[in-house]
Amino acid sequence: MKYFLLLILTLLLISCASDPSIDQNNLKLINNISMTQEDRRENFLYDQALQQLREVHPEAYLLYEQADDVEIRGELEIAIELYHKAMQQAPENGFLLTRLGMVYLRNEDIVPARRYLLRAVSYDPGYFKPKLGLGYIYLQNQQLQKAVTQLEGSLRLLPTVEGTFLLAEAKAAQGHLLEAKQLYQTVVKVDKNSKLGKAAVIRLRSLSK
């Protein structure tokens, strides 16, 4: 499973115990959404968050732009420093908290990544990405029910291929193989030619043995 988690981390960063089964309404929603719709809504949420940051905290926005540029170049330590400076201007901004948490995750610094993503969820519970990042962290740490909770929460906010694949991994690790297969099949149906789509095909073959 480690290979697939590394694949998910790469793709992520380019962009209840009583009833552990996935909410069937979530599964229907995931099945019915197209990649175009998903990308369009994610871009809308991103643009909306940037516009709000620019209007309410212009100094933080300028620092964010600098951090984003150096993060793209792979200079993660400098990006982290700049995100922290931006956070001083807007300490309760869920978008900045998410970006900071995700760059820590990219830098393989899990403890601060989890801390800032949890803060992002507390300040902006309606944003899907920090829950997605937390789901990845909990899955990597084999905290499976916590992973499922965060990933289902993320998918309720915005169905994504990454979230669906991660939830399939968590369900498979829990032994819920039928649900895992349904989720992998959804990934293949929605995005069969992508890296995740091809990985889902491999996982389906292994579960069928």
Image (cartoon, rainbow, N blue to C red):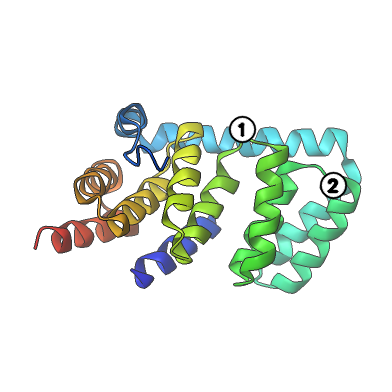
Circle 2 packing at 10 Å, graded few (<14), some (14-19), many (20+), is some
Determine which residue is flagged by label 2.
91
In the rendered image, the vertical position of residue 100 relative to residue 163, given as above or below: below
Residue 133 in the figure: left or right of residue 79: left
- x, y percent for residue 99: 68, 53
The type of residue carrying mark 2 is Pro
Mark 1 vs 2, N-terminal side: 2
Q: Please report the residue visible at 50 percent of the width from the left and 45 percent of the height from the top.
A: 150
Quarter of the image for the N terminus: give it.
bottom left
- x, y percent for residue 203: 22, 60
Toward the left, the furthest residue is: 209
Q: Which mark is residue 112?
A: none
Q: Please report the residue visible at 70 percent of the width from the left and 55 percent of the height from the top.
A: 116
In the rendered image, the vertical position of residue 159 relative to residue 8, given as above or below: above
Q: Quadrant of residue 18?
A: top left
Q: Are marks 1 and 2 in contact (CB under 8 Å)?
A: no
- x, y percent for residue 152: 44, 40
Q: Please report the residue visible at 16 percent of the width from the left and 59 percent of the height from the top.
A: 207
Determine which residue is flagged by label 1.
126
